[in-house]
Amino acid sequence: MSHLLNDAKGNVVRDAPWIFRTYAGHSSPRASNALYRANLERGQTGLSIAFDLPTQCGYSSDAPIALPEVGKVGVPINSLDDLHVLFEGIPLERMNTSMTINGTAMWLLALYVALARERGVPEAQLRGTTQNDIVKEYLARGTYIFPPEHSLRLVAETYEYCVDRIPEWNPSNVCSYHLQEAGAQPVQEVAFALANAIGILDLIQQRGRIDQAAVARCVGRLSFFVNAGIRFVEEMCKMRAFAELWDEITRERYAVTDPKLRLFRYGVQVNSLGLTEAQPENNAWRILLETLGVTLSRKARCRALQLPTWNEAMSLPRPWDQQWSLRLQQILAFETDLLDYPDLFEGSPVVASKTAEIADGARAEVARILAMGGVRAAIDSGYMKGALVKSMAERMTRIGSGAQVVVGVNKWTDALPSPLVGGDDGGVFKADDSAVADALRGLEETRHRRDPDRVRNALAALTAAARSGDGMMEPSIECALARVTTGEWADTLRSVFGEYRAQTGVAGQRLELDETRAARLRVRIEAFAAARGHRPRLVVGKPGLDGHSNGAEVIAVAARHAGFDVVYSGIRLTPEEIAHSAVEEDADLIGASILSGSHVELTRQLVKALAAAGGADIPLVVGGIIPKGDIAALEALGVRKVFTPSDYELGEVMERMMDVIEGRPG
Amino acid sequence: MSQDGEPAIATLIDAARSGDKRAIARLITRFEDDRPEAAAVRRDALARLDAAAALGIGRVVGITGAPGVGKSTLVGAVANRIIAADPAQRVAVVAVDPSSPLTGGALLGDRTRVRFPHDEPRLYFRSQASAAELGGVARATHQACRVLVRLFTTVIVETVGVGQGEVEVVRLADRTFLVLQPHGGDHVQFMKAGIMEVPDAFVVSKGDLDPAASATYHTLSASLRLAAPGAGDRPIFRTSALTGAGIDELAAAVAAAPAGGLDRRAPYFFERWVATEHGRAGLRRLATLAPTTATYLATHGGLDGAQQAFAAS
């Protein structure tokens, strides 16, 4: 029957489900290994490894800037010894492993290859993905290390290495995910991701290190990592548009004839941006609906899916929360009849028209970016960053005005208390504080046991390759085998390539604050200036390694718009640097943005640093993903006001900051 | 403590002279204050600063250029090099960014690119909003420099300039460097605006982009001879903050700029203040009160006293 799914011989079949993953990793290699094995036993079919920020930014766990972040948002990997522990009892040859790693992607891939070599697993059998999408790090996520040209060379070299040796590895995974989290609309999400993919493939082609057939295979290995929001019909059409355009680009721009190499292959993590701290149980429904957008249409179904958890706006997830999300995937794949049918939407004029609308818009936007000189030029000029900041501001304005309904936030806010947050742990995850000690001990042991001559030679070979333009993958694998540490690998390349300091992306942006409110605030600020002889000076900065700069930038732009003099200190600062900025700038207020889960530790260090720098009296406010249960701890440290994702109304945030500056009770 | 919770000036000055950055920062805020009553505070503060054992008066060096030419990175590298080369040097940086003419607010982002070691007592960095003033140099910049030259040996003022700004910073600084980037085409714009005559020296930045930097260097030296024949050979530095090339030479040139000239330029800043506060009528009145602005200042105890006296006259 035509409504059933048939194989080539005409037998009725059922589709195999997508790969079920959970983005996971925390505390230590040992603890994360236990978590992965438990998840696999519960029916998860692939691994998605979350690394901690020091590993992502190329620091060993004992670097001063790394210490507060060790094991917080993922697992710390200092050397090959850690990777051995992480994969203990997990067969590499049968695993599909996805690593969310970017600035240090080549290093983690080298470690994975080295692990396979020491275990006697043929490299060619490895399957999985290194995220390795550096462009979106510059745009939205912040874990870049080197200037763009050098970072892109690292990306290109991983393709050149994998194409023959690890043919089933996806060397990079172009992420539109973070673009949507940063505010991108569907057309922007599709266009920016495609422009980004074109940037990588053009570069590989220009470098000319591999032949045309190999370039075509690189095209076939380039995968995408996409976000799915709550408007699931539009999201489904977005995925169909993505697939159509990718087929077009691979055929026309790269002359790939094999249709298999032109397939649009993508994994998904559904949207976290729209998850709310208020009435958090509602997020379970949101996650379900977002899942539909990327599974309903067979033609545009994801290859792998990982779901956030209902409490993600409050904290990092607990194992139970992750299990609950995994069960959703299993019910959809195995209880429902979804996988029995061919595409449900072929021939729907609504879907066809909506898909065409997104595809046309994205095609035009890709052309615009290419005309500017491609994705590199669009990073340098701040064009893409600016567009994202603007979209995010518009979104906040729509939510603020009620034009965009968010249940429990700007509508139906009255609700019974949620029993889900009533447990002893308040429904949130507490990282294991012994993680740092474990990581440091492991690092110490590795340094003690290794052969220093082999380490020195391996690093010298890496330096030589980096300087000469030779491939850095093999020297990196030798570094891995020699037990070079993550910090040493990255420092070696830093010394050759330098470090990148990003444009802030905030200049020239104007925020659609509620104008009446902004005007009232300006009057208040002028009055302050008349009374004190200067405008209120606000120092905004992000302590620690977390690079999600959107929150800090939105606050900085809104505060300027309200009339503050804002000193934006940027990302990846130590608490001492922020304290020092505040002291030198004679700040009236410090605003620290922390999304890494290390808010208590970083705040404690910031308060201490302020006292040491003679600025103990400068008031401090903190914003970020901060569980309600931690607010009292922050206030006890002296924080004057804590802002959480429920404080989405910018005018309100600005007024509360003025209250603190003027010394009114919060 | 005074009534508004701020420490007394004498306390601030003692602390600032011992290198307390919070005290230095607070002093600058008091100097930036443009309310009339602030003049008395400044006069008192300067008298106390000058009465204390003389630290000497430092040099003011302007670094200017179009947005994006790499000024901040360059300033960071130069300041670090100056203190590394000479233990007697203390360097302060004032970085001026524009204020929004619509809201009055400003976003000051230079700290993201200039990174000083936070525990280095011989370096100080301050961001400043240009307020509503044209020229890229705020009135407050001059006031901040008056404090800083008494506490630091070298004060670097970094301004965004695309024309008028260069002229203003030259009024403020003992030496001014104009930064140009390869392929910028800036020098053509500056030539048109008649700005090329103004700076004392040039810097071609981003020298790692060779050979574009070489091309810019040669075009520049050729066009300089055309722009200001007979003006003497003004040096052109080539630098790369990435590789460190040329930073030593530029740092040496900055550190060799003449010091101590800021107070001599007080009459200009007084006239500018009169024009802002009292307009042309004010300037005409000033001309009737003394034969020269310098004499007026001398009679009334310097810039701050003159402001008090003029406001009262």
Image: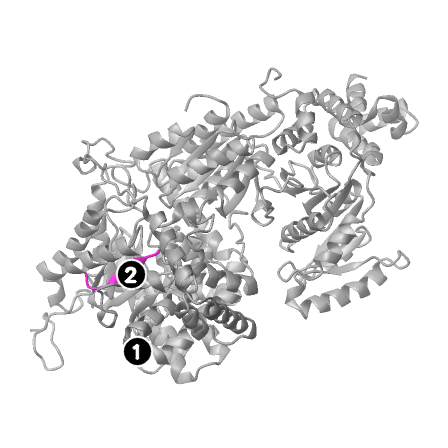
Is residue A47 inside the magenta stretch? Answer: yes
Query: Where does the image place residue A10, in percent across and percent down from the top left?
Result: 9, 80
Q: Are marks 2 and 1 in contact (CB under 8 Å)?
A: no
- The CA span between labels 2 and 1 is 22 Å
Query: Where does the image place residue A209, in percent across and percent down from the top left?
Result: 47, 81
Q: Is residue A552 above or below residue B306?
A: below
Residue drawn at (42%, 47%) of the image: A67
Residues A644 and B80: in front is B80
- Side of B187 relative to B21 (left or right): right
- Side of B116 relative to A263 (left or right): right
Is residue A639 inside the magenta stretch? Answer: no
Report the residue marked by disc 1.
Answer: A124
Q: Is residue A556 above or below residue A79?
A: above
Q: In this figure, what is the number of numbered marks?
A: 2
Q: Amino acid at mark 2?
A: Val
Please name which of the two marks, 2 or 1, marks the residue nearer to the observer.
Answer: 2
Q: Of helix, strand and loop, which one carries label 2?
A: helix
Q: In the orientation shown, which residue stands out farthest toward the top?
A: B3
Residue drawn at (50%, 26%) of the image: A661
Report the residue marked by disc 2.
Answer: A85
The magenta stretch is A43-51
Residues A75 and A386: in front is A75
Q: Quadrant of the C terminus of chain A?
A: top left
Residues A462 and B189: in front is A462
The reply to whether residue B125 is in sight is yes
